[in-house]
Amino acid sequence: MRKTIITLLFACAALFTFNACVVSEKKLTDKVQEAIIDAEKQEGNTLEITEFDLGEKTGKDYKGVLKGTLNGESVVYDVTVNDEGSDFDVDWELRK
């Protein structure tokens, strides 16, 4: 009985941790999109995002792809995000 309870507690803890990571990545995705849109707006551009994927996480970095329209033209950006937890840095470069 004791082993069953301990196993159940570990399973619940693992599930909670996994769900917290998924929610965190969703929030990060939303914040990165907002940051890129705001930066383009400050440059006088209009960016509409049609697809964005953070990509694989390596350490604290994500390397993803953003697709959308910039001033009416289709664009693809390579996006690098450094997630420091409470803050993040994002760089994006237009594919040629």
Image (cartoon, rainbow, N blue to C red):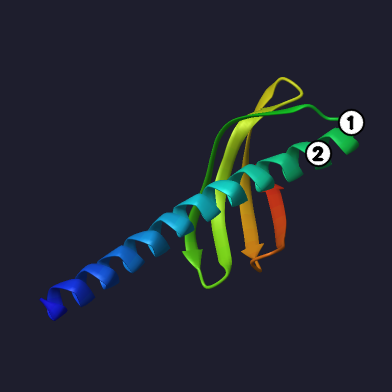
Quarter of the image for residue 70 reads: top right
Quarter of the image for residue 60 reads: bottom right
Closest to the observer, 71 or 8: 8
Q: Is residue 45 left or right of residue 74?
A: right
Screen quadrant of the N terminus: bottom left
Q: Which residue is at 58% across, 35% downward? A: 67
Question: Badge 2 is on which residue?
Answer: 38
Query: Marks 1 and 2: which is nearer the front?
Result: 2
Taking the image as drawn, is residue 94 in sight?
A: no
Neighbor class of circle 1 (other Cα within 10 Å; few <14, some 14-19, many 20+) is few
Q: Which residue is at 72% across, 40% downward? A: 34
Give the residue furthest to the bottom.
Answer: 2
Q: Which residue is at 63% across, 51% downward? A: 79
Give the residue furthest to the left.
Answer: 1
Are the residues flagged by discs 1 and 2 in contact, CB closer than 8 Å?
Answer: no
Residue 35 position, x and y percent, is 75, 45
Closest to the observer, 64 or 13: 13
Q: Is residue 56 left or right of residue 80?
A: left
Taking the image as drawn, is residue 58 in sight?
A: yes
Q: Is residue 2 left or right of residue 68?
A: left
Q: How many marks?
A: 2
Is 82 rendered above or below residue 43? Answer: below
Question: Badge 1 is on which residue?
Answer: 44
Q: Amino acid at mark 2?
A: Asp
Q: Amino acid at mark 1?
A: Gly
Residue 72 position, x and y percent, is 72, 20
**Quick one: label 1 or label 2, which is nearer the N terminus?**
2
Screen quadrant of the C terminus: top right
SS at mark 2 in the image: helix
Q: Which residue is at 72% across, 63% downward? A: 87
